[in-house]
């Protein structure tokens, strides 16, 4: 679908093996992996969890970001252990970036969950999962209508942190 060279593919770990699929939204200087689960905790709604891998002009990794509970967590390259590993914690599948300076509390990183990413355009990810519009877990009254899209987050932080 694109001429972008092959880049980082995160290894993922979860006690929930019911991953539906993984969608890959590729931009010129970042990738967003959308991990798609059949439910969000006990709620009867699908779950799409984005993992952003942002690149410098030379195609080296600049930062990695995840969204937990509609809030982004970003780690610069020097904080991340490579190969890139993401742990999906609990039934809400909150993503955690494996880093060199954080204790992950014994979360399972023994067996990675295999997947093949399917490349998609940004329009193929529903707004409910991109920005939380009408999503039942987006309960913050201040930001209910104003969650930041992962593409905006990547572009904004790329200009601040990447060369």
Image (cartoon, rainbow, N blue to C red):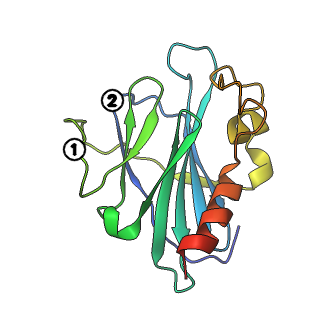
Label whose residue precedes the other's in the sequence (1 or 2) = 2
Position in image of residue 91 (x %, y %)? 43, 23
Left or right: residue 92 compared with residue 107: right
Residue at position x 63%, y 73% in the image: 159
Position in image of residue 88 (x %, y %)? 40, 37
Residue at position x 46%, y 28% in the image: 18
Q: Is residue 64 visible?
A: yes
User: Which residue is identified by label 1?
Assistant: 103
Left or right: residue 103 compared with residue 115: left
Q: Nearer the viewer, residue 71 or 151?
A: 71
Position in image of residue 53 (x %, y %)? 52, 62
**Relative to 60, is 98 above or below?**
above
Quadrant (top left, top right, bottom left, bottom right) of the N terminus: bottom right
Residue at position x 46%, y 79% in the image: 60
Which dot marks residue 114?
A: none
**Relative to 18, is 159 above or below?**
below
Q: Residues within 10 Å of mark 2 (few under 14, many from 20)?
A: some
Determine the secondary structure under disc 1: loop
Q: Which of the 4 image quadrants contains residue 96?
A: top left
Residue at position x 71%, y 33% in the image: 143
C-alpha distance separating marks 1 and 2: 18 Å
Q: Nearer the viewer, residue 145 or 16?
A: 145
**Relative to 1, is 19 above or below?**
above
User: Which residue is identified by label 2?
Assistant: 15
Q: Which of the 4 image quadrants contains residue 141?
A: top right
């Amino acid at each position: 679908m694109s001429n972008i060279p092959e880049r980082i593919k995160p290894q993922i770990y979860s006690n929930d093996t019911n991953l539906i699929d993984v969608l890959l939204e590729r931009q010129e200087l970042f990738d967003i992996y959308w991990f798609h689960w059949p439910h969000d905790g006990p709620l009867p709604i699908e779950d799409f969890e984005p993992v952003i891998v942002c690149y410098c002009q030379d195609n080296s990794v600049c930062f990695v970001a995840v969204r937990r509970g509609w809030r982004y967590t970003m780690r610069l390259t020097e904080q991340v252990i490579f190969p890139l590993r993401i742990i999906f914690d609990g039934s809400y599948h909150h993503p955690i970036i494996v880093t060199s300076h954080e204790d992950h509390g014994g979360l399972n990183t023994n067996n990675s969950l295999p997947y093949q990413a399917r490349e998609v355009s940004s329009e193929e990810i529903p707004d409910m999962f991109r920005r939380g519009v009408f999503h039942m877990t987006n309960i913050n009254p201040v930001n209910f209508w104003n969650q930041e899209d992962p593409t905006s987050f990547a572009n904004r932080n790329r200009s601040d942190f990447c060369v």
